[in-house]
Amino acid sequence: MSEDAKTLKIPFIEGDGIGPEIWSVTKSIIDTAVKIAYDNDRSISWINVPAGNSSFIESGDPLPKSSLDTLKKYKVSIKGPLTTPVGGGFRSINVQIRQKLDLYACVRPMKYAEGVASPIKNPADIDMVIFRENTEDLYAGIEFDVNSPEAKSLIDTIENTFKQTNIRFPNSSAIGIKLISQEGSERLVKSAIQYAVENKLPSVTIVHKGNIMKFTEGGFKNWGYETAKTFFPEVTYTWADFNEVKKLKGEAAAKEFLQNNAAKGKVLMQDRIADAFFQDILLHPKNHSVIAATNLNGDYISDSVAGCIGGIGISPGANINYETGCAVFEATHGSAPDIAGKDIANPLSLIFSGVMMLRYVNWNEAADLIENVALNLILKGKVTADLLEDKSKGLACSEFGNTFVKEMNSFQLSGLATKN
Ligand code: NAI
């Protein structure tokens, strides 16, 4: 897509459960913002892409090939949440989309918006961007059911060929494979460092469980540090560099080394073992800026950090392949069947994902408008109940959408004045 295009063709997947409710609100907000920001000179032509439960019911296929082809063709798209049956049925459509389009980086900015109810004392200390590896790890989908010929054969090989004796219950084990590669780790950490450099952020923390899983999680950590050394030698440094200066020149020189690096905008590469990182989220969030994590750890971390700043109903996400440019922006929460159809879902996660998408295509003016109005509404408490201490004051999803559009229109008339 050319950046100076006045009409962008963008595929969307409405999603299951609360998907249609939050998509309808998000679409009208994005359309209005584009109209206002570019004085009717630009627009988005939306292409409806079937996927998920509704597509399964209609065509027997939850992810038709034509849908994948459309996402590939137009490169930039947006989606609502999709339901995945547990313990049977079809494989996660979200995971399939990420794998088939090789969207290796799941990017989730996590920043506190003033006014949101939070369970922690200083939520404003949280300002992190999580880069979760999206295609490998236990999510590769190589998993065999208990008593299947594949599970039996694998267990037999592990016990009799590899002479491993620590499968506790070999006759009743299902088995899955954890895959972490050098290439996969390198491209993920590369995008995390690149992001830190471009956005002038102070550090990249590699989160791993390498103390237990030496070659997979430990590999991720080691390859992460090597990536910094190989591709970003001029703009990154580590605590080992700090210790070296301290050893050679003393404490004061080492402190100066840190200050100089920070002043020059250099990126500190550090790592944390996953369990300690979860403690850091609560106790030392200011020590972390950009996070690079393996797939499963990244999944847990994303929801945990989101919980500290208002929950998954507000945090946006994107799945990106920085090499092909292909990107699917998405709400980070699921299809929330418990509240579907009740008009109480919070559409902000999808709306903020739309903001990320507009920035990705360089339509920053429309993105700024949505972001400003959203932050203003959050500050005024004009949001859905999940973000409020007093749930009785929450707006319905559709009501929030109407208020948002009205606010953008008055924003157009009076600009920043409406922020007060
Ligand atoms: P969920 O994220 O759908 O819901 C967890 C809790 O958060 C529920 O209490 C729900 O009501 C609440 N919640 C979620 N989104 C909300 C919103 N926008 N506003 C207010 N409250 C919200 O997770 P759950 O229940 O584990 O999964 C439901 C389905 O969604 C499953 O089939 C799961 O596989 C799928 N899923 C899909 C994802 C995706 O499409 N990217 C991500 C996570 C889950």
Image (cartoon, grey):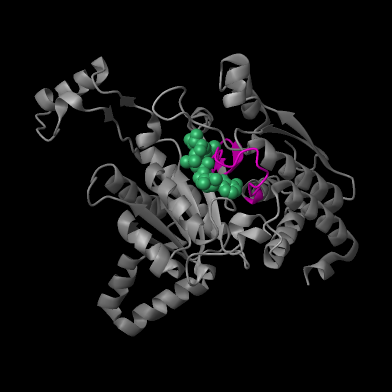
- Relative image position of residue 154 (x, y in whole percent): 21, 22
Residue located farthest toward the front when viewing the structure as drawn? 392
Q: Which residue is drawn at 70% across and 48% down?
A: 397
Would residue 121 appear left or right of 12 to someone viewing this image? left
Residue closest to the eye, 302 or 249? 302
Residue closest to the eye, 264 or 74? 74
State yes or no: residue 281 in magenta. Answer: no
Q: Is residue 325 visible?
A: no
- Relative image position of residue 79 (x, y in whole percent): 63, 37
Would residue 103 appear left or right of 211 to someone viewing this image? right
Residue closest to the eye, 87 or 374? 87
Q: In which quarter of the image is the N terminus?
A: top right
Decide: is 234 above or below 144: below
- Relative image position of residue 63 (x, y in whole percent): 56, 22
Q: What is the number of callouts on the image?
A: 0
Q: Can residue 357 be seen in this view?
A: yes
Q: In which quarter of the image is the C terminus?
A: bottom right
Examine the image and state in which quarter residue 216 appears.
top left
Q: Residue at x 35, y 81 (%)?
A: 253
Examine the image and state in which quarter residue 318 appears.
top right
Would residue 4 appear left or right of 71 to someone viewing this image? right
- Majority SS type along the magenta span: loop
Q: Give the range drawn in magenta.
A: 319-348
Residue located farthest toward the bottom when viewing the structure as drawn? 252
